[in-house]
Image (spheres, grey):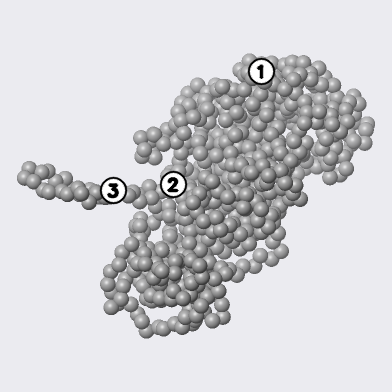
Amino acid sequence: MRKLYVHGLIAITKVDDSMRYTLKEGNYRQYGMQVNGEGVIFTFEAEKEEECRILLYGKEMEVTQAIQVPARYCRGAVRSVLVQGLRAGHLKYNYEKDGKVVTDPYATRVIGRERWNDPKRMSGLVCGGYAQPEFDWGEDMPPEVPRSRMMIYKLHVRGFTMDAGLRGRERGSFQAVGSYIPYFKKLGVTTIEFMPVYEFEERMFPETPALPEYVQWEVKEGDRILPEQDAPEPKVNYWGYAPGNYFAVKSSYAAGKDAAREFKTLIKELHAAGIECVMELYVEGLTNQCRILDILRYWMSEYHVDGFHLLGEGLPVTLFAQDPWLRRTKLFYTGFDSRISEAKSSYPHLFVCSDEYLYPVRGVLNQIGGDVGAFACQQRKQHRTLGFVNYIADQNGFTLADLFSYEEKHNEANGEENRDGTIWNMSSNCGAEGRSGKKSVREARERQLRNAIAVLMTGQGVPLLFEGDEQGNSQDGNNNAYCQDNPTGWVNWKRNQKYAWLTEFTARMAAFRREHPVIASEMPRVMSDFLRKGFPDLSYHGENAWTAAPSGGMQPFGVMYCGSYEELPDGGTDDFVYIGYNFQTASGRLALPKLPENGQWCLCMDTALGREPFLPEEEAVREPQIPIRGRSVVILVGRKNEESPAAAGAAKRRRQGKERLKA
């Protein structure tokens, strides 16, 4: 007689002992399962005093072998054993430590969650498996996009394509995301940030509270016994922000049977298109630091991942930043130690990613405690070695469209009586809560969407778009769609077709940002002419030119970038760029400084012009001031005297930019 092993339970049954294996000491060097010519090595954490076994499973997830791991194969708190004659191909395994069954935290494949939110899968057994490491990477190389050229697009693999008109298992898969690479290129995306794609349990089983031992129930005459009720259907952890099996790809995100190969193929295709792959990784603060480092190194080396957005309190990011293996891997976190951030680097790879940009920008856009001084600081925020990620909306809170359609959160569908989600949204509904057919409401919301995209693309930091925001995607006022694995949480491609103009505007703004690198310079602006170019690198202007930086209130102001401070690859310099912001309701006027060598200011874009804010042809502005309508953003470019060689080069770049945009 032998034990039948199930998580947390032990019953009695027979185990097949017909196959015997020879055991040898392992190598201790690498956790998890390793394959060599003799068999399979298992290495895992366990105290020497613990009784440990390796459990092998059959087709029906029954235990077929329970292999005792001798305590002598222990170094420190690490067990390692070579099981000779064992083959890894279709191996299913778990560990048992002092009677408790656990799945290998270093397993490169998890078996048992192949189907997303499978109702047949209760809180039962999953086990580790073997992911074939062989993959033809060819000449794959990391794009290593400079931060001045970066544009991040954050998406949920499942939600991005579930409502995209695809069929079968292709919906919500890595393969489906790959089919959108041309879309990303047209939009101007350089970096895809994936919400968790490592293996996690999406079925959230409610815990049944146990009565204390001292509470005894005695049935008395007259007691009313209520009939037993069916257990509620578990919620879905749709986003995946939970501890998981960090070395395994989420198997239910695969269109086929090999999730690891499918994800590698997607990364290879992204790299071929010049697009980076960044993974979000949620880790609890008490997780072993060495293990977290192993996780990052694994995805970087095995999957060619270009970066990690680390989520969790108190993570040892200084350790990761100093690791030579991760020296050219981009790391995103809420902050870094000043000693690390000030260190000189041939490849700056550290990025601050927090809500610091979000609130000042929402404040001015929606006139809620808005302060153009704080806004202006955020727009020019830059560091010599650190990058800053700017976003106005992400998964936490309203989508960009809902930011201008709802003043209150509407999370009733989450089953928490609308108590979940942040109440501090700094949003405005533009005159009506939720969907509205009023023309004035619709036009106000559309202008606010254009303003938001224009603001995001003219900030000096790295812009980040959340999936669907470039096409007016709505979650119907739900600002915490963590459990909404349905059309609420999915990108609605069909409904959003009416926002094709917004997608086009986003692509145009991204192209303008690329064509004028002076906007996204990696060097902080000092607001002085420290290189004697004749103009400050950055200057502010109000109704009168050369006014002091804006401080407090909502008055209109303009920002002028001196293009001479940005050298271009062809040896020339960028144009003068002037961006006017007016977040108040009333119209205003902004002064335009006089340009050198009889240069001419030309209006390129005005968000007040409707769904096509970019002018078909630039419009020369001959007055010393320009009117700016309420709640609008304008962009002007200073063109040089057409007779000068510099002007000819600039004109050539403009033609090339237009040709690329058409392509």
Which residue is nearer to you in this view: 428 or 643? Answer: 428
Q: Is residue 609 left or right of residue 114?
A: right
In the rendered structure, which disc, 2 or 3, sits on the residue that comes first in sequence? 3
Q: Are marks 1 and 2 in contact (CB under 8 Å)?
A: no
Residue 220, given in percent of the width and then of the height, sits at 8, 46
Q: Residue at x 48, y 75 (%)?
A: 73
> In the image, which is nearer the foreground, mark 2 or mark 3?
3
Q: Residue 3's mark?
A: none
Which residue is nearer to you in this view: 186 or 143? 143
Give the amino acid type for the residue marked by disc 1 in the picture: Gln
Q: Residues within 10 Å of mark 3 (few under 14, many from 20)?
A: few
Any part of residue 254 in sight: no
Q: Residues within 10 Å of mark 2 (few under 14, many from 20)?
A: some
Q: Which residue is mark 1?
A: 555
List the residue tagged with mark 3: 209
**Quadrant in which the C terminus is drawn:** top right
CA–CA distance between discs 2 and 3? Answer: 27 Å
Nearest the eye: 648 or 326: 326
Taking 219 as reference, is 372 above or below it?
Answer: above
Number of callouts: 3
The residue lying toward the viewer, choosing from 171 and 578, is 578
Image coordinates of residue 335 in percent, x first then y, are 61, 42
- The answer to whether the residue labelled 2 contacts the one labelled 3, judged by CB atoms less than 8 Å apart, is no
User: In the image, what residue type sits under mark 3?
Assistant: Pro
Identify the residue under disc 2: 485
